Image: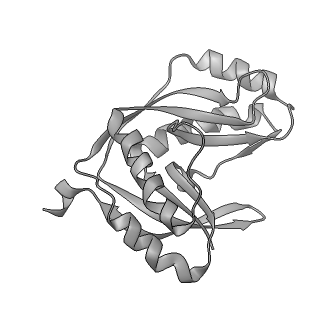
Amino acid sequence: MRLFVAVDIPEEVRSAVNALLARLRPQCTGARWARMEGLHVTLKFIGEMLPEKLEAIQQSLAAVSFPKAIAMDFRGLGFFPNERRPRVLWVGIEAGPGLASLATAVDAALVPLGVPREERAFSPHLTLARFDMSRGLGHLRSAIEAAGPLAFGRANAGEFQLYQSVLKRGGAEYTRVASFACAENES
């Protein structure tokens, strides 16, 4: 089973992003656009794991220290690795150090189970599209520039989730396996 750990986003943020994407999608036919219902903030991509390890993964994640909700501000668009040769279009997330600390704690909790430690620095974002070719990128860049400064809303992350990802012809489908609340939510 293919697994990842993420923070869900509220419907208001999802709706604001979807409104912008309705204008951007027609501009770039060379993109594989994300499904709105699947938008999330990835904390850790685990990858393929044997089903027998699922219980141990859940126990390790339940032990992650997460003392209070984390404020997140969703704003701006960008490209990974860069605008000239993009592979991914993303929405940026401004958050205090708590979000990066949570990602680091999740990463560390899974290492004893054979999940490799993350090599890249944590960069919180929402993936909107992936690119295999440059068809339509010029129009997309122009549409983004014309949109001006973008803000999609704020949220407080009071829990994180373990998801199973099933790759299908129409895109990945995600199923929530478990949720883990922060300490202030448990009282």
Measured from the top left, where is residue 108 in percent x and y? 45, 54
The structure's colour scheme is one colour
Q: Report whether 15 appears left or right of 180.
A: right
Q: What residue sits 48% from the left and 45% below the top?
A: 14
- Across and down, in percent, residue 156 comes to 30, 44
Depth check, front residue: 152 or 67: 67
Direction front: furthest residue: 112
Residue 21: % across, % down:
62, 37
Q: Residue at x 55, y 83 (%)?
A: 52
**Visible in this render: residue 131?**
yes
Query: For the N terminus, which image quadrant?
Result: bottom right
**Location of residue 2 with respect to 9 vertically, above or below:** below
The quadrant of the rendering that contains the C terminus is: bottom left
View extreme (bottom): residue? 52
Q: In this orientation, which residue lies closer to the viewer: 98 or 113?
A: 113
Residue at 74 percent of width and 61 percent of height: 170
Q: Position of residue 46 (x, y in %)?
A: 58, 60
| Residue 10 can be seen, yes or no | no
